Structure formats: structure tokens, C-alpha cells
């Protein structure tokens, strides 16, 4: 699986690439890294219109990953290879929740678990720009 990242992109363009692979998961971008099993502060979250080149130390490139990676390994690899702090969120009904308690799950497991929750596979259009869905 591949996500293309370059400085001219906005956050929402990267999020859409990830969402293609995992329709019941999404990623959010933050200015700082989250620690352990703690939830990330919303005040540190980057807006969907934020341009990647506005962050210091971010690298452009193709980000390769596998569905059998743990959520934590995915987040760590994103940070280590591209300098971006991401957090995976899992769909639970009509909202997204942070995966802080399931960092040891694989992306595939998190996707599968989310698909089992009633209301997660509704046929309504997905709005990845809705930053408050997970509150």
C-alpha cells in the first residue's frame, strides 16, 4: 500500500489516500507526537487545509505500509520516515474514536472491528473534512 506525500499537498489529500485503503479508519495530523495511550490534544490538530510544507522537518516521498502493521508501527513509521505526527482513528457508529487503547492492533484488525459496529457502513457520503466527528 502506498501514500504519496509532498509539501504542496494539504492534509486532506493525504487523509483521502489512507481512507481509500481503510474506509472505516482515518488519520489525523498533529503538530506534536502523542505519548503512549494518551489521547492527542485537539488544539494540536492540523486543519484539513493545512499545507505540509508549512511544517518544519517534513520530508516528501512515497510512504509504503502494509495492512498487517500495528497501528503504533504505522504511526511511528509515518513520523520516522516523513516527520509527520499522525493518529489513527477508528469508526464507531457515526463517529470516529482515537485508537489509543488499540495501538497493538493491526490496521486490518482495526478496520475489521470498525466494520462490525452497527452504523459504521452506512451508505451516506463520508466527510473526511469533518473535524468534530470524533468528539
Image (spheres, rainbow, N blue to C red):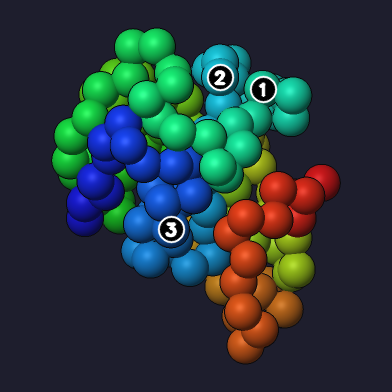
Q: Is residue 103 left or right of residue 99?
A: left
Q: CB of mark 1 within 8 Å of CB of mark 2?
A: yes
> Of the residues under marks 3 and 1, which one precedes in the sequence?
3
Query: Is 49 located above or below residue 68 in the figure?
Result: above
Position in image of residue 32 (x %, y %): 56, 16
How much space separates mark 3 and mark 1, taking CA atoms? Answer: 20 Å
Q: Residue at x 37, y 25 (%)?
A: 53
**Position above or below: 22 against 123:** above
Which one is earlier in the sequence, the residue at label 1 or at label 2? 2
- Asked whether 87 or 102 is in front, the reply is 87
Write down the residue under mark 2: 31
Local SS, label 1 = helix
Q: Which mark is residue 16?
A: 3
Give the Cα separation between the discs numbered 3 and 2.
Answer: 19 Å
Q: Secondary structure at mark 3?
A: helix
As drawn, 14 above or below 123: above
The answer to which quarter of the image holds residue 82 is top left
Residue at 52 percent across and 57 percent down: it is 25
Percent of width and height locating residue 130: 70, 56
Amino acid at each position: 500500500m502506498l501514500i504519496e506525500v509532498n509539501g504542496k499537498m494539504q492534509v486532506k489529500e493525504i487523509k483521502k489516500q489512507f481512507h481509500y485503503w481503510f474506509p472505516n479508519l482515518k488519520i489525523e495530523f498533529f503538530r506534536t507526537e502523542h505519548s503512549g495511550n494518551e489521547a492527542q490534544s485537539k488544539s494540536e490538530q492540523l486543519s484539513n487545509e493545512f499545507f505540509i510544507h508549512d511544517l518544519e522537518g517534513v520530508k516528501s516521498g512515497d510512504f509504503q505500509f502494509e495492512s498487517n502493521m500495528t497501528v503504533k508501527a504505522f504511526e511511528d513509521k509515518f513520523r520516522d520516515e516523513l516527520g509527520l505526527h499522525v493518529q489513527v482513528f477508528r469508526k464507531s457508529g457515526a463517529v470516529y474514536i482515537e485508537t489509543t487503547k488499540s495501538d497493538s492492533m493491526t490496521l486490518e484488525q482495526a478496520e475489521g472491528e470498525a466494520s462490525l459496529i452497527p452504523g459504521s457502513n452506512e451508505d451516506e457520503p463520508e466527510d473526511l473534512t469533518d473535524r468534530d466527528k470524533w468528539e
